[in-house]
Amino acid sequence: MTRAATYLGFVLLGLLWLVPLERLTGTAFPVHMLRHMGLVAVVAPLLAFGLGDRLRWLMISPLIATVLEFMVVWAWHLPQLHGMAYLLPAGFALEQGSFLIVGLLVWVSALRAHNGLAGAGSLLLTSMHMTLLGALLILAPRDVFAEICGRAADLGGQQLGGLLMLGIGTPVYLIAGLWLVGRDLRSTDPAPQT
């Protein structure tokens, strides 16, 4: 099971980074969000679960991991940094690499937390800030990235990107958080009396 998770994580990582999705779909922002959420909510948990002890060096306080992830994600969604990642290959590599690193920090720290509730809380807080960012993208009255990226305004594409953020992130973080709480509860249940 852990080997399959590792292989699947690396295959998805390759697909997200190597397949020219923008050219295939003809859209920029939804692909950006698909890559972003694929990295932090699919690839990172698969690798954190699959590689297990090999990634223990990434374990920090789940709350600190969440704060770092929050800062990185929101920074890359500021129009200037988003434009840099869209227009410059080095900016794109830095953005994508930082998404993967903070995603791994959150997931390794949450899955390995001594207290499942702390790990679940970290995932819940991550889900909350992703939900807020997704909602802001959906509700924005204009395409906030088009001008700085030098592309035509695509409010529908931005809204679809926000929906992808909500649709991928919310269930993944919620289900994983509930699983961590359940794991914690199962491990503290007293042995049945006979």
Image (spheres, helix red, strand yellow):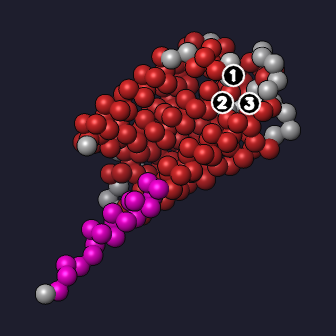
- Give the distance between the C-alpha atoms of the residues marked 3 and 2, in whole angstroms: 6 Å
Q: Does 123 sit left or right of 167 as displayed?
A: left
Q: Magenta includes 191?
A: yes
- Give the distance between the C-alpha atoms of the residues marked 3 and 1, in whole angstroms: 7 Å
Q: Which mark is residue 27?
A: 1
Task: Examine the image and state in which quarter residue 11 appears.
Answer: top left
| Callouts 3 and 2 close, C-beta under 8 Å | yes
| Callouts 3 and 1 close, C-beta under 8 Å | yes
User: Is residue 140 visible in this depiction of the protein?
Assistant: yes
- Quick one: label 1, few (<14), some, or many (20+) residues within 10 Å? some
Residue under circle 3?
157
Q: Magenta includes 174?
A: no
Q: Give above or below for 116 relative to 9.
A: below
| Callouts 1 and 2 close, C-beta under 8 Å | yes
- Give the distance between the C-alpha atoms of the residues marked 1 and 2, in whole angstroms: 7 Å
Given the image, on which type of amino acid does mark 1 rest? Thr
Given the image, on which type of amino acid does mark 3 rest? Gly
Q: Give above or below for 119 relative to 165.
A: below
Please name the residue shown 53% across and 52% down the image: 171
SS at mark 1 in the image? loop
Task: Examine the image and state in which quarter residue 47 appears.
Answer: top left
Residue 87 location, x and y as percent?
66, 14
The region drawn magenta spans 175-193
Given the image, on which type of amino acid does mark 2 rest? Pro
Please name the residue shown 49% across and 59% down the image: 121
Residue under circle 2?
30
Residue 51 location, x and y as percent?
28, 38
Q: Earlier in the sequence, mark 3 or mark 2?
A: 2
User: Is residue 57 visible in this depiction of the protein?
Assistant: no
Please name the residue shown 51% across and 34% down the image: 38
SS at mark 2 in the image? helix
Q: Earlier in the sequence, mark 3 or mark 1?
A: 1
